[in-house]
């Protein structure tokens, strides 16, 4: 852990112009944010009513009625507002800002005298803080605070920050080690990382200390949750919680003793993100080591190749090492977002590229797979293998939805994806003292203070279709000495670095290429990464992937779809001794780089109509077409497969 | 369908002396029946209390207290009593008969004035017949009636028959097409086949007609269940029933329109058994054709190679054609028993050996796998692939128990297995006019009336270890003309038939070898079946078994266990071009014929500690040892695998 962490660059200083990413980012700004506004206002025909805004109207006395929706329904408004904030940070938009201010007005009105804010508890008149295990009050508070900080940073408008600070001040009065305070912590972490953000924005140490209290107290024996009514008297808000042990919410032992990722995946990674924040803020090497151990456990034993986590639907949770089933997994979009949050924090305090490799993997695969290319439909669960008929008729897979939906019962994913895409710039660049880090290869322009001067970097990339990335430097003064650090992804064994067309020397350290020199205006760095298609094997301790391979290109995982390859994808055997051919198909979903694979497939026309016999099936040689996983399910419902059988 | 169905031979006329089967049957008589008596009396330390007998004591006013256990807890007593009956039919045993009479006394006392009998409803004072969808009243009645008929046939004691007839008479008053009667039918079928048994024993046509009414009314629109409070007001006894559609209990359409097996597997096969009974009794060719279509759907598309059914745990149900996952399936022991019941009925009315093939498959694999070799531990769920660590830590598999248990929350399987084993003789032989059918190759003696005379057949067999079966004939008079029909199992392509050592001619029809002649005393038939080990492939429409094989010997399915082959069984690839070697291991579980398979396995010592990379794992050539599936999990907890990867 370094003494000083990397900084983000303000989103207003980054402008993304990337053929791949703008397809999604523009959707967020132009389609998803206005669309989600209509959704939370219940104006979308055919979508399940969210009641989000209506709940705030009722809580603030503007309307009559009952609270509807889930116990944490408010968070959809907060996540939407956070997405709006990042969008406005890049480019003010009066129409959207008006929506946001309208929402903020309502939120402020719904806040109680003492600072408490939660429409579910307020409208229902439920007693506060009596069910920290399941009640989601602190989780909901956390999302509000995150949104407030983002909106203030984007617009400079203080109103929502005042709401957030009043709420946080109130929380500091309620929770803490003092005898007259509650000695609990949230069942669903989120408040911890939010309080750190609020502390960093306001400088108010109490917020950091409360986050620290939550982290340090969690899992202490006897566990606080055991004292609550819901567990003591089996009086659960969510019936299934009766089946869940304390590891479901990472409270089975103190965090200083936890070394493996356990329980509900979203809870886990939100918690680990806060742990990383606090390890840095308190320069606590021991806590940092815990973060490293847990991160290593995820990435070494519990991570899907598509950058997703959560092997089981029941409990939406981690299960055990090397248990990565492809068709019954949960792999929630939000969990991948949380994993990116945790990993990017680890990167910021270590400068180790392996963390950004994971961020990139999550972003280019599961997070993007979460939204349709029209921006209006979302996946919550992200399997690596789907047979629609079976997913629809076998209740073991009842959590698997075979086409993206407009909205969900628990709708955390759409606004969570939106806020992530809207703030993509935060992942692309980071800033150290006199070093600019280029973490992701997304065509964009950035301005930053380096060597006491304002420097502009313009990155040209068509990644990962193309492995060549150009970074052009514009200076205000004629010369400026600083370092450009460019990530060398783990998959790229070869790398060639040129400056102004000449092979340049560089230092490579922990996955970053450091080029330190006295730059001149119009200098251009060219980095050539190896993004050739490659076959990837899984550790054979993962039983579901034994004898299988998947295709990757750069961070992209590829998959087979029924529309290209017919049904029974799992009868395909690819011949990995043959080269993978590239085929750019401009007609496919606005243009896709496809992989053509040689292999064989069972000839189903020859299959006898009996269930068991002594004959081996016949195969036919064939060429198969794979597309990036993030683009699947944009051409109707059908089978999909990531891990393919491999010829011996 | 034939005009006259085959008859069973009284169990008192059959004596089984088989080295394989007596291991289990003797357990039933000597261990399981007395042990289950202790269990239902709550006298077994360490086992979950059943409250079965206690409920009857409370209902009959002998004790005070509340009903405890499930809504259908009474059926455990009935199934136990039925098992006792079959055991006594073979050999009276005063000690056990005393237990049974004691239970009958209690049952009779618990019967209401009007004939109704159900401790749950009586003790709780719940209104009768208000929840046919979930209430299990008719299901519970059915098991009582089955037990009563069996006990009367075994002992001639009328008391329990009187109870059953009073109950059935009452049911005839309550249910039926008349306007003043209830027009419903049970959510869980069972009463239908029980009423047919009662009709066959008593000759009382009303019982048959009520069974017929239940069958003919089922699924008619509007569905009766939709009129009940539980569905109308979402007021469920079992919370999960809210998720279940009408096909869960085969009431989604009239049975005359159903052509596929749907819903809860045990319900389904109990229902189809009754359909077959009624098709025969009413000589209804159309209903028989429905039975055939449904049976073909099961056996052609929904049957595990181990003779089990029910691909999903949630709903314990059929899912869709060719969906046969190996490690998340339900495959309840009771469903295999029900499948054997349905199939043997189809055999009795068709004389087609294909039905007995399925009976044999269920008996030799899943039904036996349901009990441990000590007779004291039971499986409810029977997966074909288990990795204990994953089954225990991934909640998708929370229904999979990794070692047999003493008792279960819903404890239908142990007494159901017991009654099946105790009545095995009913499956071994059947009688036609002047033909004796030998269906299963279980060493035994039988006496039957053939050609107007008493004939004794003595079958010698060590099947399926050995394919040679001898049947010696003893006559009272010197000559007697009748037919011996011996099943030629579907797996045995070759068959050699000799009489007194001379190759004999025979007619083979629908899987039976008919030898008609004038027999002389001491004649001996020898049948040589091909029981050599064989590799069996699954239809590749079953995605989970593509590229895999299993080993069979006769009806036995073999499996690999961790104790013999190490962990990571799914990394084993067998070379099916090499012959399977036999190895008799006398030290293994009282002697087991093992299969030795050549192949290779991943060398885990060479596996790199990363989750994903570009290298292919290394394999080591090895020989593997497989044992019969029915004997698995008798040497401690460990991995188990039926379908093995096959070398290309």
Image (spheres, coloured by chain):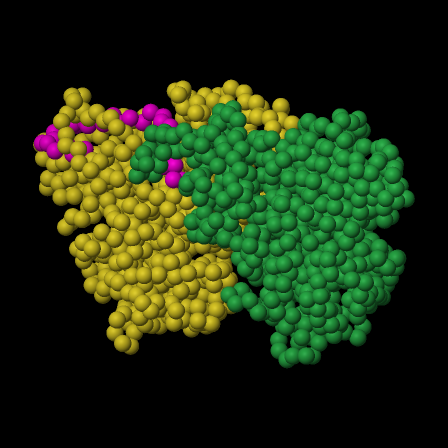
Chain colours: A green, B yellow
Q: What residue span does the magenta drawing correspond to? A: B513-542
Image quarter of the N terminus of chain A: top right
Taking the image as shown, residue B559 lies to the left or right of residue B639, namely: left
Report whether residue B179 is seen: yes
Q: Residue at x 84, y 42 (%)?
A: A475
The x, y position of residue A433, in whole percent, is 87, 42
The x, y position of residue B351, in whole percent, is 20, 42
Give the vertical position of B74 relative to B613 (above or below).
below
- Farthest right residue? A452
Residue B530: within the magenta?
yes
Q: Residue at x 80, y 59 (%)?
A: A153
Give B455 or A577, whichever is nearer the viewer.
Answer: A577
Residue A545: within the magenta?
no
Magenta residues, dominant SS class: strand
Q: Quadrant of residue B453?
A: top left
Q: Quadrant of residue A531?
A: top right
Taking the image as shown, residue B199 lies to the left or right of residue B239, namely: left
């Amino acid at each position: 852990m370094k003494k000083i962490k990397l900084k983000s660059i303000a989103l207003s200083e980054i402008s993304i112009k990337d053929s791949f990413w703008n397809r999604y980012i523009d959707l967020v700004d132009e389609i998803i944010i206005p669309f989600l506004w209509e959704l939370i206002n219940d104006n979308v025909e055919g979508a399940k009513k969210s009641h989000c805004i209506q709940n705030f109207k009722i809580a603030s006395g503007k309307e009559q009625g009952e609270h509807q929706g889930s116990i944490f329904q408010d968070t959809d408004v907060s996540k939407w507002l956070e997405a709006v904030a990042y969008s406005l940070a890049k480019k003010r938009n009066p129409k959207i800002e008006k929506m946001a201010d309208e929402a903020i007005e309502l939120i402020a009105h719904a806040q109680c005298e003492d600072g408490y804010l939660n429409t579910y508890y307020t409208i229902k008149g439920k007693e506060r803080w009596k069910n920290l295990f399941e009640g989601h009050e602190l989780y909901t508070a956390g999302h509000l605070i995150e949104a407030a900080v983002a909106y203030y940073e984007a617009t400079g408008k203080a109103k929502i920050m005042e709401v957030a600070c009043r709420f946080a001040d109130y929380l500091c009065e309620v929770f803490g080690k003092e005898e007259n305070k509650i000695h609990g912590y949230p069942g669903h972490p989120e408040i911890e990382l939010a309080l750190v953000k609020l502390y960093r924005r306001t400088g108010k140490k109490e917020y950091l200390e409360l986050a620290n209290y939550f982290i340090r107290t969690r899992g202490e024996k006897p566990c606080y949750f055991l004292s609550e009514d819901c567990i003591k008297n089996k009086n659960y808000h969510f019936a299934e919680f009766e089946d869940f042990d304390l590891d479901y919410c990472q409270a089975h032992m103190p965090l200083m003793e936890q070394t493996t990722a356990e329980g509900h995946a979203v809870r886990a990674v939100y918690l680990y993100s806060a742990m990383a924040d606090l390890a840095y803020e308190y320069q606590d090497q021991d806590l940092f080591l815990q973060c490293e151990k847990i991160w290593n456990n995820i990435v070494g034993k519990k991570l899907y190749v598509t950058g997703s986590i959560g092997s089981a639907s029941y409990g939406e949770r981690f299960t055990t090492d090397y248990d990565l089933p492809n068709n019954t997994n949960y792999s929630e979009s939000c969990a991948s977002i949380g994993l990116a949050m945790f990993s990017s924090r680890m990167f910021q305090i270590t400068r180790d590229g392996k963390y950004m490799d994971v961020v990139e993997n999550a972003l280019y695969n599961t997070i993007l797979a979460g939204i349709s290319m029209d921006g209006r439909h979302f996946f919550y669960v992200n399997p690596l293998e789907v047979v629609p008929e079976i997913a629809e008729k076998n209740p073991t897979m009842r959590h698997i939805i075979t086409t993206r939906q407009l909205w969900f019962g628990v709708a955390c994913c759409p606004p969570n994806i939106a806020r992530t895409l809207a703030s993509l710039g935060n992942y692309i660049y980071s800033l150290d003292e006199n070093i600019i880090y280029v973490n992701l290869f997304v065509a964009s322009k950035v301005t930053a203070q380096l060597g006491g001067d304002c420097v502009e970097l313009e990155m040209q990339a068509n990644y990962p279709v193309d492995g060549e990335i150009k970074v052009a430097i514009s200076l205000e003064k004629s010369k400026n000495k600083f370092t450009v650090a460019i990530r060398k992804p783990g998959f790229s064994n070869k790398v060639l670095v040129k400056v102004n067309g000449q092979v340049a020397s560089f230092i490579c350290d922990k996955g970053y290429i450091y080029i330190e020199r006295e730059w001149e205006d119009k200098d251009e760095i060219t980095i050539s990464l190896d993004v050739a298609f490659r076959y990837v094997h899984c550790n054979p301790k993962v039983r579901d992937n034994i004898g299988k391979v998947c295709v990757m290109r750069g961070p992209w995982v590829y998959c087979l779809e029924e529309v290209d390859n017919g049904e029974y994808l799992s009868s395909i055997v690819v011949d990995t001794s043959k080269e993978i051919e590239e085929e750019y198909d401009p007609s496919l979903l606005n243009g896709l780089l496809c992989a053509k694979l040689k292999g064989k497939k069972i000839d189903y026309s020859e299959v006898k109509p009996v269930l068991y016999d002594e004959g081996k099936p016949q195969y036919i040689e064939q060429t198969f077409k794979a597309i990036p996983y993030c683009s699947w399910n944009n051409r109707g419902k059908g089978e999909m497969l990531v891990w393919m059988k491999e010829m011996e």
